[in-house]
Amino acid sequence: QASLEDYEETVKKAKEAWKVWADIPAPKRGEIVRQIGDALRQKIKLLGSLVSLEMGKILVEGVGEVQEYVDVCDYAVGLSRMIGGPVLPSERPGHALIEQWNPVGLVGIITAFNFPVAVYGWNSAIAMVCGNACLWKGAPTTSLISVAVTKIIAKVLEDNNVPGAICSLVCGGADIGTAMARDERMDLLSFTGSTKVGKQVALMVQERFGRSLLELGGNNAIIVFEDADLDLVIPSALFAAVGTAGQRCTTARRLFLHENIHDEVVTKLAKAYAQVRIGDPWDSDTLYGPLHTKAAVKMFLDAVEQAKQQGGTVVYGGKVIDRPGNYVEPTIVTGLPHNAPIVHTETFAPILYVLKFK
């Protein structure tokens, strides 16, 4: 874990590296980003395995996450030849107004545990072709994949005779994140994480009149009317609620069913849940792996208990699985009133609250 002294040194090197990077023509920057994508593609299975090992998501999701970074690199290459502002007519005869876009500077990127590679890729590839340097703080619990990706990027940069510090990494906790949010040298700060922490980050950045990008939580819902195709509803709801063991900001946490189809859908969905293959995330047959930490298991159990106390009935799951690791059963809860507090709370776990409407 980095100290604040390590952070200070890293920021200074990143700012110096940015001066070099910003002077490189955008198409050349795009070519280097293309090489980064190719380097990641060559090691995609190893990197995906490392994501799976650290985060706990199944192997196909880990590999797919690295593929997202590769895809964004490919997209960014095209953007590198399209950076430019419009030419506008002037009120003065024989004159025109030219709008020129310049790099922001140093972009801080704070990522969460659940998508440790993809989120960094979305931010960094675009930032780089625009001429910015990046300073990455990954989640403390996924440091290995952060180091591996940064080393691959640094080699590509240095092979092109530019500083590896253009993409720097600081492994640390909340103290490093707070320093980044308050640091006026951080020209743009991108934060991905909980809504609670995102509000704190936004306020700290705003206090210095800085700029921020926030990708926070979500209490997402699916609404199913009585004329819906249930053959589509069941697998869609299953994947949306159970994928990544419910640890996505886009996870479906509420399922609203018309009263005429409510019982049928719940019965079919429970049967589908029973067929989900739970096991080692490195096993190619596994569809559902463990939660990320023991704290997440406790949060799951607390949420299930709150749902029961607020009038809910667990029709599937609701328990910890008796095996090594942080495994819990994917869970379906019915019968909650629409105004139940737990329904309005994002629970970062595989719990689906099913509600009835007329």
Image (cartoon, rainbow, N blue to C red):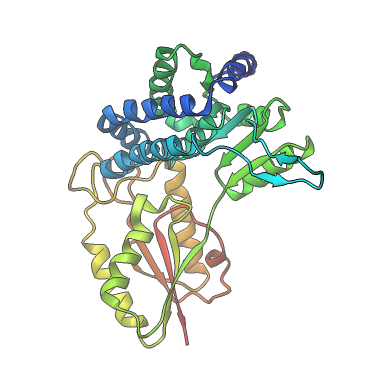
Name the residue located 33 percent from the left edge and 82 percent from the top edge: 263
Q: Is residue 151 found left or right of 174 in the rendered image?
A: left
Q: Is residue 276 at all visible to an observer of this figure?
A: yes
Name the residue located 54 percent from the left edge and 33 percent from the top edge: 127
| Residue 25 x, y percent position in the rendering | 53, 24
Residue 192 versus residue 355 in the image, above or below: above
Q: Residue 315 appears in which quarter of the rendering?
A: bottom left
Q: Is residue 238 found left or right of 140 in the rendered image?
A: left
| Residue 61 x, y percent position in the rendering | 31, 44
| Residue 165 x, y percent position in the rendering | 53, 17
80 or 21: nearer the eye?
80
278 or 70: nearer the eye?
70
Residue 148 versus residue 330 in the image, above or below: above
Name the residue located 24 percent from the left edge and 69 percent from the top edge: 271
Q: Is residue 6 at all visible to an observer of this figure?
A: no
Residue 309 versus residue 258 in the image, above or below: above
| Residue 137 x, y percent position in the rendering | 54, 29
85 or 271: nearer the eye?
85
Q: Residue 197 appears in which quarter of the rendering?
A: top right
Count of marks, rendered view: 0
Residue 157 versus residue 84 in the image, above or below: above
Name the residue located 36 percent from the left edge and 62 percent from the top edge: 331
Q: Is residue 10 found left or right of 220 in the rendered image?
A: right
